[in-house]
Image (tube, grey):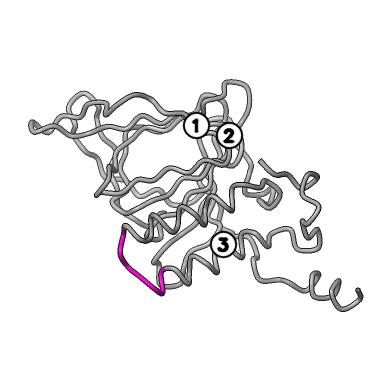
Amino acid sequence: MMTASADPTADRSDPIAPLREFVIEMTRLVDRTADESALVAQGRQLLARLVARDDWLPDAFAQPDPQFYRQYLLHADPLERFSVVSFVWGPGQRTPVHDHTVWGLIGMLRGAERCQRWRRGADGRLAPDGGEEILQPGQVDAVSPTIGDIHVVANALADRPSISIHVYGANIGAVRRHVFDPATGAPKDFVSGYSLDAVPNLWDRSAAVRAGASA
């Protein structure tokens, strides 16, 4: 994992540049194709590049809550073709069994996450699908209704927060999704919303432009 101090090429006058560049490249990608397999495959490469360094996420979007995991909106495409969020997990925090209904990518930025996938049987009940997986910094996972959309995610660390960056094929905070009773498979609708009513300013490049002009 690359940090600000370890990266001699980091532009300290424009620290959020990696996120802005990711948003630009994702926008170009959704302009080119609506094919889910291409979006997941190519989006995975873009997200891997973003989470390979940990010097760009603003502090306001990295704050844990003592009771609940937080979902901070970092960017929503104006046509709602994709959104980018930071998930911040306090020690021991976890989701219920849930789905997404759209494709999604999960890139680990800090700490670690445990993920257990679930599948629905012919009788409608849910069962664990394979073993638990651990996502480490720099790694990227994917979900979708096509490849598997139901899982439980938890902070793998008991003593400090973990942060992952998620990209979804919709404005995920406004998508009607489901949590499931793991014993019966019964679904319950939910809409997640977001944990903050603000997003980072990706577009104020004035400091970098001034620095370039004075160089």
Residue 200's spot in the image, x, y percent? 63, 60
Residue 34, magenta (yes or no): yes
SS class, disc 2: strand
Q: Return the disc, 1 or 3, that comes first in the chain's sequence.
A: 3
N-terminal of the pair, mark 3 or mark 2, is: 3
Q: Is residue 91 above or below residue 146?
A: above
Residue position marked by numbered label 3 in the rendering: 22
Picture coordinates of residue 45, whole percent (x, y): 49, 54
Residue 78: assigned label = none
122 in the magenta segment: no
Label of residue 162 in the image = 2
SS class, disc 1: strand
Gap in angstroms between the C-alphas marked 2 and 1: 7 Å
Tag 3 secondary structure: helix
**Left-right relation of 92 to 145:** right
Measuring 78% from the left and 44% from the top, which residue is drawn there?
Answer: 6
> Which residue is depicted at the point 32% across and 32% down?
117
On the image, which quarter does residue 163 sit in? top right
> Which image quadrant: the N terminus?
top right
For marks 3 and 2, give the CA distance. Answer: 21 Å
C-alpha distance separating marks 1 and 3 = 22 Å
Q: Hey, what amino acid is under mark 1?
A: Glu
Report if the CB atoms under discs 2 and 1 are less than 8 Å apart: yes
Q: Amino acid at mark 2?
A: Ser
The span shown in magenta is: 30-36
Residue at (66%, 71%) from the top-left corner?
203
